[in-house]
Image: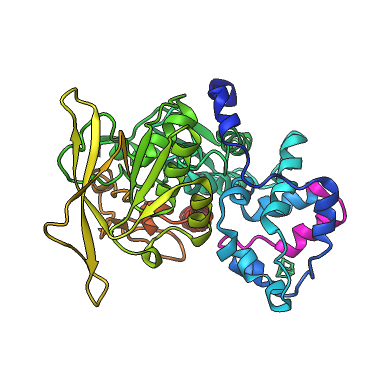
């Protein structure tokens, strides 16, 4: 898979690793700080319940392969999660070291250390001892939820095919995460590992239309929907069809996977979530002189994590609060010239209200909307009998089964857009649910 992917050579230069890896010596020293807690809160805080003290102990004993296998046993995407997990609010946030007024154990960097060693050594998993089982499963989408589901089912002996409409697999891990957090090549090598288990991948294959799903239902015993979310929300303001208005995910995918490094001189990003921050930082690193994030509420309401906000400020991104864009203007030559905004006041209950007559213009030559993704309504309504509420697929939280017993689902299409590790946990949980159903069907 990696052989078909050629990244623009400047990308690595402009997006160097945000957190350089540990050296062998510093990893052992850090591993030896761990208290190897019984009932470790770090493990409890991980949605995939990686046995943190166990993998750290193995690093301390310089058994890096054993450490990586402990991680992979719980989370087949252990490498990408070590790059992109918001550990400050998960495992590291729960580390008991905080109670001792000590910095938490660097769990993410240790996990990455073990996973890097595993991939550097050839990334071979032990042969599964599971006997071949009757049952074929189709996973729609090749993002983290589907990959986790497929790997788990394959390791249990089932035939699994993953379908994805994109040229490259990995979903947002490949296309949507800032390169300085997770290089595309690292996302792809992880998918090769899933492929090495015997999972069949069909890339560039779109499953769409009721007939396509009906065929799939005939051929497969269960279908897992790991389809993620759809296109980014539009701003719904005049001028947004200008070619210099590029949504955040398209912008990020463009520089990561399609060699599109062009950026405006003055860039305005609309929205203040983590994707908005990734896009704003990318614009800076690609050479924009000025990058501003507009948000209609205040700093304390912004959906991005606090550490992402701090990072953006360090990158030189400016924030403009209580600002509502209302139109995008081009000059007579058709060049994007400014974004027109209104000031916003917050009612006592926090509801933002635009102030009539407070119009002002921000000069810019590129606008990046980043106000969230819409659900894939069309696709989901094609899956007969799968209930969707408020744009999310409704599932049994234990088994991942939908209201149509043949369909299971997980990841962003169920949770509305959370972390990679949540999608992995969902996919694995659904795999266990699917295996249970198939086992009883073939008993
Ligand atoms: Fe080690 Fe901290 Fe986890 Fe305890 S909570 S096992 S000290 S990483």
Magenta includes 60?
Answer: yes
Q: From the viewer's perspective, is residue 412 above or below residue 291?
A: below
Name the quadrant where ligand 1 sits: bottom right
Asked if one can make out residue 443 in the rendered structure from this viewpoint, the answer is no
Relative image position of residue 422 (x, y in whole percent): 50, 57
Q: Residue furthest left?
A: 357
Q: From the viewer's perspective, is residue 164 above or below residue 382?
A: above
Front-most of residues 363 and 81: 363
Front-most of residues 376 and 339: 339
Relative image position of residue 123 (x, y in whole percent): 72, 37
Residue beneath the point at 63% across and 64% down: 91
Q: Is residue 300 left or right of residue 361?
A: right
The quadrant in which the N terminus is found is top right
Q: Quadrant of residue 203?
A: top left
Magenta region, residue range: 46-65
Q: From the viewer's perspective, is residue 96 above or below residue 284?
A: below
**How many callouts does the rendering have?**
0
Relative image position of residue 16 (x, y in whole percent): 61, 37
Magenta includes 191?
Answer: no
């Amino acid at each position: 898979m990696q052989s078909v992917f050629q990244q623009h050579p400047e990308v690595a230069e402009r997006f160097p690793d945000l957190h350089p890896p540990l050296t062998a010596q510093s990893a052992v020293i850090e591993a030896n700080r761990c208290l190897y807690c019984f009932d470790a809160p770090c493990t409890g805080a991980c949605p995939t319940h990686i046995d943190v003290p166990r993998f750290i102990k193995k690093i301390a004993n310089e058994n890096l392969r054993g450490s990586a296998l402990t991680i992979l046993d719980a989370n087949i995407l252990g490498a990408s999660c070590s790059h992109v997990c918001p550990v400050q609010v998960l495992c590291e946030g729960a580390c008991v070291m905080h109670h001792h007024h000590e910095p938490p154990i660097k769990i993410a960097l240790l996990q990455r250390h073990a996973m890097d060693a595993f991939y550097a050594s050839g990334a071979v998993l032990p042969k599964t001892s599971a006997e071949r089982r009757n049952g074929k499963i189709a996973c729609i989408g090749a993002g983290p939820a589907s990959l986790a589901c497929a790997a788990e089912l394959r390791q249990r002996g089932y035939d699994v095919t993953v379908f994805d409409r994109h040229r490259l697999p990995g979903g947002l891990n490949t296309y949507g995460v800032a390169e300085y957090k997770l290089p595309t090549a690292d996302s792809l090598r992880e998918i090769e590992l899933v492929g090495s288990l015997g999972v069949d991948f069909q890339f560039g294959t779109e499953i769409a239309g009721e007939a396509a799903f009906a065929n799939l239902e005939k051929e497969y015993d269960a279908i897992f929907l790991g389809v993620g979310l759809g296109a980014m929300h539009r701003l719904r303001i005049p001028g947004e069809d200008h070619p210099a208005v590029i949504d955040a995910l398209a912008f990020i995918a463009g520089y990561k996977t399609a060699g599109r490094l062009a950026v405006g001189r003055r860039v305005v990003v609309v929205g203040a979530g983590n994707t908005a921050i990734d896009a704003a930082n990318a614009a800076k690193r690609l050479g924009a002189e000025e990058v501003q994030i507009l948000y209609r509420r205040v700093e304390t309401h912004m959906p991005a994590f606090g550490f992402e906000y701090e990072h953006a400020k360090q990158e030189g991104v400016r924030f403009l609060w209580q600002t509502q864009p209302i139109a995008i203007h081009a000059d007579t030559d058709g060049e994007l010239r400014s974004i027109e905004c209104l000031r916003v006041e917050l009612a006592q209950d926090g509801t933002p209200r635009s102030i009539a007559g407070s119009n002002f213009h921000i000069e810019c030559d590129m606008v990046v909307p980043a106000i969230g993704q819409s659900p894939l309504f069309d696709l989901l309504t094609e899956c007969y009998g799968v209930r969707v509420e408020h744009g999310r697929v409704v599932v049994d939280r234990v088994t991942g089964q939908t209201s149509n017993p043949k369909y299971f689902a997980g990841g962003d299409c169920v949770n509305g857009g959370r972390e990679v590790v949540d999608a992995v946990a969902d996919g694995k949980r659904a795999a266990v649910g699917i295996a249970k159903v198939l086992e009883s069907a073939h008993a």
